[in-house]
Image (cartoon, coloured by chain):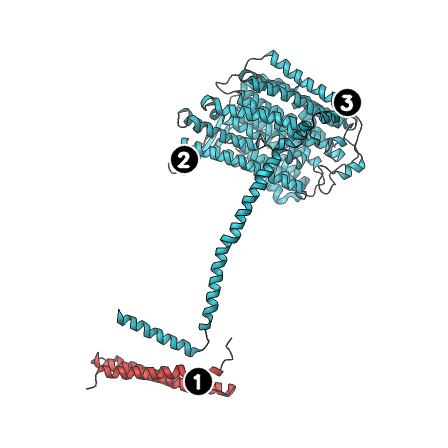
Amino acid sequence: MTQIAWIIPLLPLVAFAAVILWGERLPGRGAYVSIAGIVLAGVAGLAVLVEVLGGARADLTYQWVVLGSRPLVVGFVVDPLSAVMLAMVGVVASLITIYSVGYMHGDPRFPRFFAYLSLFQFSMLFLVLADNFLFIYAAWELVGLCSYLLIGFWFERPAAARAALKAFVTTRVGDFAMMIGILILFLHTGTLAFTGVFKGIEAGQLTGPLLTVAAVLVFGGAVGKSAQVPLHVWLPDAMEGPTPVSALIHAATMVAAGVYLVARTYPLFLLSSGHQALWVVAYIGAITALSAATMGVVEDDIKRVLAYSTLSQLGYMMMGLGVLGYTAGMFHLITHAFFKALLFLGAGSVIHAVATNNMKEMGGLARAMPWTFGTFLVATLALTGIPPFSGFFSKDAVLLAAYAQDKTLWALGTAVAFLTALYMGRLVWYTFAGAYRGGAAAGTEHRGDGAPGGTALGGGHLHESPPVMTVPLVILAVGSALLGFLERPFERFIHFAGVEAPRSSTTVLVLSVLAALAGWAAAGAIYYWRTVSSADLRRWFPWLYTLLVRKYYVDDLYGWVFLKAGGIVVWAAGAFDRYVVDGLVNASGWITGRLGFSLRYLQTGREENYLLLIFLSVVVIVLVRFVR
Amino acid sequence: MVTLTHYLVLSALVFALGLFAVVSRRNGVAILMGIELMLNAANINLVAFNKYAAPGAIQGQIFALIVITLAACEAAVGLALVLAAYRSLETIYVDEINLMKW
């Protein structure tokens, strides 16, 4: 299996081609084909993982073209890092695809949805297996395209269309930086293969500040795709897409691609002088983690809370990688993929039942939806880092690494742990505890996440979701609960030579758990027992509340800078085009027209005139001949 | 002594007269006559050159004969056309024959 790993991405690609061409006529309106594609890929991914655990490695390369004297070698790599990602993407994507059958039931564009999902799965598996910057960049753009298509899947809604555009354009900024970084690396090392580039850097072909710049530029791509500050604005809006998409692309896999990229190109960051590039990664991650967590506290849309949580956890992963916690960052990526996919699918199940995204119109759903509630709770405990759930182990590993490197980052990380528990506690208490605050009327008014037709929705009466949706939830819940115990084997399996995991520290461990428990307690005090009401808090800190609700004014700032100021530039360019460029073109046309208009008097239609003219011309030509 | 120049001047005069007739006359028959004049001017040139430039050759003479034949044909066709035009349009003034003019 290892030697033919290239076949894995092709399975979803075949499914995509089949579903997009014959969607309606295939079994299950294309859904079964799509599921078959990804499940086969997932099984193959697991097989690869087992083989790699047994020591198998592969680097399948072939020479593509020769640029001047530089051969361009492309191919696929199978090593522990890609094997783990392969298995994770395969499993999570399979479960989400199965879940989608229930969630998208009755949607008019049902086959197309599964076609896009398959295309995305192909792109993501391709990205994971790439062994060179060229492939990874191509796959990078492909997943971006799929993200665009799926966010804007319900393009009838202006908000969805806008969000899709925003996501595409914002990530493009990062992609551009990444391209420049890749070109710098290619220029100096003469190759695009990861191993070749790293060898070239070790040999000193690219050193000093330029290496740091190149590393940071490559990281720029990760910032865009993983929605780190300052390019984080697109991810919360991306929640306009269908919930399975949010779970698959905007929580579990695509946004984690940024983290994977940093891990994949880790030598680049490690070899930059004084670990400067790593330092940038760590601080960007920490800032993202903190700012996103604070914004999550005041958000009312259940999916957007989870989106902020994703941002925050991605920040955690980046921070982990930045503080030399290579294993910790990757481990958090894997555990996060499971519990965040579960959280989104659980939220989708809730939205399916109550037909709104607004948490304030939910409540008391624990009794109506026991399976959803149970699995959601497992995922929440995992996310908030309560032992013995998986998130505890991975988050703790990140915090340990931070503690060993930089106490500031560790303090930020612990604060984020508190905030995570606060907003997740708020979400759980709002959604599942108390009494149901919505109603049939509220349900139809705010259709929330529903398809435009509204047929896919429960329409406001509470009910548990069908088994096709709850079974994937349970499987993911098992993963979320138990993956943490694989920490030791994972460490032995995925590690970076020369980067050792720090020793365990009881202080860090106890403090992070205490922070999480404090967060839960605070959330309970405010949103359940109402010892302190949230309205009071809002009254006491109005400026803080406004700041958070306005998302630190980042969206407004971008609105001003890029839409208003940029709008002026665009207007000026438009005016230049309309009046100067078009003016020149129109002027030449007008002059030709006038010339023709005046010359047309020569065309009398009388042959005598023409004949005379011909004769006179002959005379002139003869005279000229004589004179010369 | 008649030299080549005399012939050429005569030819030029005849040609100019023919051209003048063609461009200035409205009468179709007169235009045909102008064309005949121009053709004959060419004939004068041909035989004159044959005589003075290449006395042993005969091609100039023969070519002149061919041109005369051609002129006869042309006159026949041209007159037929003029007659036909007169029958249907009752005029042989070429500036009035403008049915197909845009």
Residue at mark 2 = A71
Disc number for residue A516: none
Q: Where does label 3 land, which residue?
A: A530
Chain letter for the part of the structure drawn in red: B
Image location of residue B75, percent across then percent down? 39, 85
Element on which disc 1 rests? loop
Chain letter tied to cyan: A
Label 1 Cα crowd, 10 Å radius (few <14 / some 14-19 / many 20+): some
Q: Are marks 3 and 2 on the same chain?
A: yes
> On the image, which quarter does residue A567 sit in?
top right
**10 Å crowding of disc 3: few (<14), some (14-19), many (20+):** few
Contact between labelled residues 3 and 1, with CB atoms less than 8 Å apart: no
Q: CA distance from mark 1 to mark 2?
A: 82 Å
Q: Tag 2 or tag 3, which sits nearer the N-term?
A: 2
Foreground pick, A126 / A153 = A153
- Would residue A237 be seen by someone viewing this image from the given angle? yes
